[in-house]
Amino acid sequence: MKTPAGKECPQYYADFHRGRHVQECRLAARNPDSAPWHPSDCARCQVPDILRANASPDMRLRLTIKPGILGFGRSNKVDAYCEKHGIAIDDPIVGCPRCNAERPGIDAFLNALESKE
C-alpha cells in the first residue's frame, strides 16, 4: 500500500472506506519501545527502501520511533535480525552476510558494489 510519503510499503495500512479513518504502521505498532506512529514518519522511513533492495524471507525488521528533545523532531531507527542464523544484521539493505555467502554468484555482485564506492 502507498504510504503518505508516496512509497510502497507492506507494513503500512490505511482504511478510509465508508467513513473509516484508520492509518497505521504495523511495524511500529509491534514495538512497545516505539513512540506512537504519525503519518509524517513515513517521509524519513527506510523500511520501504530496505524491503525493495532485500527480499530475504528470514530477515525481520524492527522500527523504533523516538521523539526529539522537547517534542521537536523525530527519528526512525530500523534494526534487522536474521532468523535463520540468529544474528543481528548491520546493513539491512545488503542483508545477512551468512545468507549471502550461501548464495552462488553473490560474491561477484558484492565485489562489483564495493568497487564502485
Image (cartoon, grey):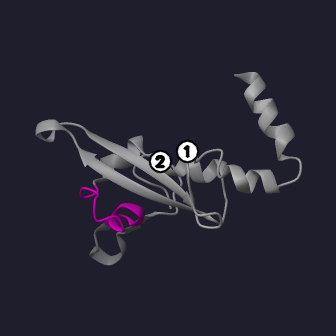
User: Which numbered dot is residue 90?
Assistant: 1
Alpha carbon separation for disc pair 2 and 1:
27 Å
- Horizontal side, residue 111 vs residue 26: left or right: right
- Judging by the rendered image, the residue that carries numbered circle 2 is 6
In the rendered image, which quarter is residue 51 located in?
bottom right
Q: Residue at x 14, y 41 (%)?
A: 71
Kind of residue at badge 2: Gly
Upstream in sequence: badge 2 or badge 1: 2
The range drawn in magenta is 23-37
What SS does tag 2 mark?
loop
Kind of residue at badge 1: Asp
Give coordinates of residue 110: x percent, y percent.
77, 38
- Horizontal side, residue 70 vs residue 83: left or right: left
Give coordinates of residue 52: x percent, y percent.
63, 51
User: Which numbered dot is residue 37?
Assistant: none
Q: Residue at x 64, y 50 (%)?
A: 95
Report the quarter where the C terminus lies.
Answer: top right
